[in-house]
Image (cartoon, helix red, strand yellow):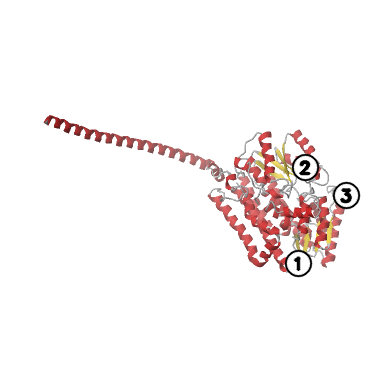
Amino acid sequence: MEDIRGIIRDLGEIREKACDLTEKMASKAREEGIADDLRAVKEKTGDIKAKFKTLKEDASKWEIRKKLGFTEVPLGELRYEKSRILKHREWRGAEDTAYDFYYWLLNWHELLKSAKTNPEAMKKMILRYRWMGDYLAIPNFVDRNTEGMRGTALRTAHISYNMMIKNFASGFKFIQMADRHIAGDNPIAKRVILHDNTFPYMLLAGFPQFLAMPLQSLPLFSSTLMNQHAAEPYIAAAESFGIPADVCPLPEAEVGVAINDDYADMGICYLATNMACDGSVINSQLLSRRLKLPTFVLGSPLRYKEEDVQKLAVNELRDCIAFLEDLTGQKFNWDTLRAACERHNLQTQYEMNKWETNMTDCPQFTGSVLWLFRMFTAVGGAPKDPRYVPVEQKVDAMIKRAHKRKESNVRKERRHRAVIWSCPANYYADFNLWLENCWGISGLIDMESHAYTIPIDTSNEETMLKDIAKCYQQIAMRKHTNGGYHNALDELWELVDRYSCDMVIMYNQMSCRGMAGLEGIFQEEARKRGVKMCWVTQDLYDPQTVSRRQMREDVNKFMMTVMKEEPLDPSLVDFDDSIAW
């Protein structure tokens, strides 16, 4: 029995020793494993530090941001379907996100400041005019037109758009003070000269006692940039009045605004033009009848490049001056005209600097901001508003610094250099930026921008009038659609060569008979030159005819079937924005 107890004691001791040994072996294994893990972590950390050090030494600040992955967020996932309202603000890296948010606040500040000046008048404007509601979409407009931007490109775009918003705010304040619908009968209304957007606005600088107001700008031209559906009720009103449904929606909508009595009630006269096309000639008659104001129609020669017609163009300007002198009882001031012309020359030079940069292998001012900001400087800008000059100076300096550093202005890569030709769709203002973000197609120059660039000789009265006449004959939408087919066709290929482009994005504006007649000639010339030409159907102001989604689909089919390419950002290829601003 004692032997059995001894054996049991011995087995217990052996068991305890075995447990102790097992625990020691497990502990040692864990220590060795942890040591191995620590060694692996240290080695990986060392590799990361070495790679980051190389990245820091070899890359510039904006390249680091790109390689760290801050630009890889699918842009299409940032917005809700159909409304395309942002779910949250786009992350662009700490610095760029903060800069973007700062300008978002600054833009709201400009809008609220214009309302704070006279809250009661602003309330009346919103209740009185349908188009005023469209300007609540201004922050959304800026977000759409800066989507995916980083670095200097983001900054120059925000600075440019902020100046446009200041322009809107000034217009709101002006209407609050001068519009009889809002302010009742007032002395300011009797100091206003209403004019078409295509009128040579700098001529009115010669009457500094009076205030020039582009009639259609706020109710229609700018509002359709904010809200794609802005023109639809006015087009419907015009068609119900008997205007044919197949005319250009631009003059049709202008008439619709008049029929709905949605123009501001102010002014001592209305200065109309025969530009940009025959539709404008007809709608000038209807607008004059509706406004019930003394009207002068400035006739512009169609063959504007011929020297024989320049005397006629100058005489038209002199007749307009005489009309205003008789109406106002004031003499024309040539000194204030000269100052406006000099600001025009300065602003034009800054615009040309942007184009010269875009001709190089490192373009800096592309996307939607190129044509949008140009539209504002061409129909108003520095000759009318001196605030544009410091903005242009600042943007010019930033572009030159970025170009010197060889900074890329695109989100991912630039696959194609393109000329964007024919009239753009106002209801899809951010289409050019979509091309860049989705397919890597950079629009380096476009038909709307490439106009109104003739410098004005301010030596004497005659040279000023002569150059103003030449300049306004080549206003946007007219320079390339009048005066012979070569102005649209030949100049396109000259720009393709100058900007080293391999692609043309050609708008097929459904209601424009003049450009439609050249379609076959454009295609034949593109084949000869080996330039890829993508046709995009649109209808200028009317998304009911051709939607934004259909415009994108034209590009998507071309890039996938003809170019055999995959999108840079698949989330942007197809989405529904039918009820979006």
Name the residue nearer the viewer: 24 or 462. Answer: 24
**Crowding near the residue tagged with mark 2, few <14, some 14–19, many ≥20 C-alpha atoms within 10 Å:** some
Query: Identity of the amino acid at label 3?
Result: Asp
- Of labels 1 and 2, the one closer to you: 1
- Of labels 3 and 1, the one closer to you: 1
Disc 1 and disc 2: Cα gap in Å? 43 Å
| Mark 3 secondary-structure assignment | helix
Which of the two discs, 3 and 1, labels the residue nearer the N terminus?
1
- Of labels 2 and 3, the one closer to you: 2
| Image location of residue 208, percent across then percent down | 76, 64
Which of the two discs, 1 and 2, labels the residue nearer the N terminus?
1
Q: Is residue 212 left or right of residue 115?
A: right
Query: Identity of the amino acid at label 1?
Result: Ala
| Image marks 1 and 2: residues in contact by CB distance under 8 Å | no
| Image location of residue 310, percent across then percent down | 85, 52
Q: Is residue 390 above or below residue 359?
A: below
Which residue is labeled 2 in the image? 491
Which residue is labeled 1 in the image? 189
Which residue is labeled 3 in the image? 308
